[in-house]
Image (spheres, rainbow, N blue to C red):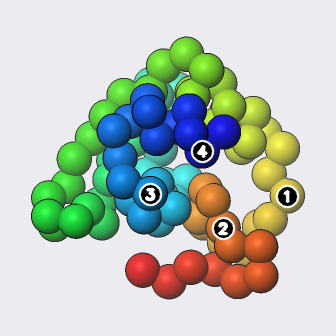
Amino acid sequence: QMCIRDRSTGARKMEIWGLKWSDLDLKTGRIVFRDTKNKDIRGVRLTGPALELLREKKSNLSRIDTQLIFPSKTTEIVL
């Protein structure tokens, strides 16, 4: 799943790992990267399999103790 999103967005690994559900609009497929390497906020649009995987992940959300889309298994990543 992570590989599909990496290739679909052109984002760096830490940009993806730091994404919160509030950074993603599942209706339009728009993602806003707020914590980028060069400190610029940028947005991209997801389509196809990457967007469908995120919609499925949101509908099957098992952790409610974090807003991160990809939380650590043991603790929330603080960026």
Q: Is residue 25 visible?
A: no
What distance separates the C-alpha of mark 1 from that of mark 2?
11 Å
Q: Position of residue 8 (x, y in %)?
A: 43, 30
Label 3 neighbour load within 10 Å: few <14, some 14-19, many 20+: few
Q: Is residue 61 visible?
A: yes
Label 4 neighbour load within 10 Å: few <14, some 14-19, many 20+: few
Q: Pick the quarter of the image with the N terminus.
A: top right
Q: Which residue is mark 4?
A: 2
Q: Amino acid at mark 2?
A: Pro
Q: Amino acid at mark 1?
A: Ser
What distance separates the C-alpha of mark 4 from that of mark 1?
18 Å
Lower sequence index among marks 4 and 2? 4
Q: Pick the quarter of the image with the C terminus.
A: bottom left
Of circles 4 and 2, the one toward us is 4
Residue 24 lies left or right of residue 67; in this view the side is left
**Residue at 65% from the left image edge and 24% from the top image edge:** 52
Label 1 neighbour load within 10 Å: few <14, some 14-19, many 20+: few
Q: Are marks 4 and 1 in contact (CB under 8 Å)?
A: no
Residue 31 lies left or right of residue 37; in this view the side is right
Q: Which mark is residue 9?
A: none
Q: Which residue is mark 1?
A: 62
Lower sequence index among marks 1 and 2? 1
SS for tag 2? loop
Q: Which residue is mark 3?
A: 13
**Residue at 36% from the left image edge and 28% from the top image edge:** 45
Q: Position of residue 36 (x, y in %)?
A: 26, 62
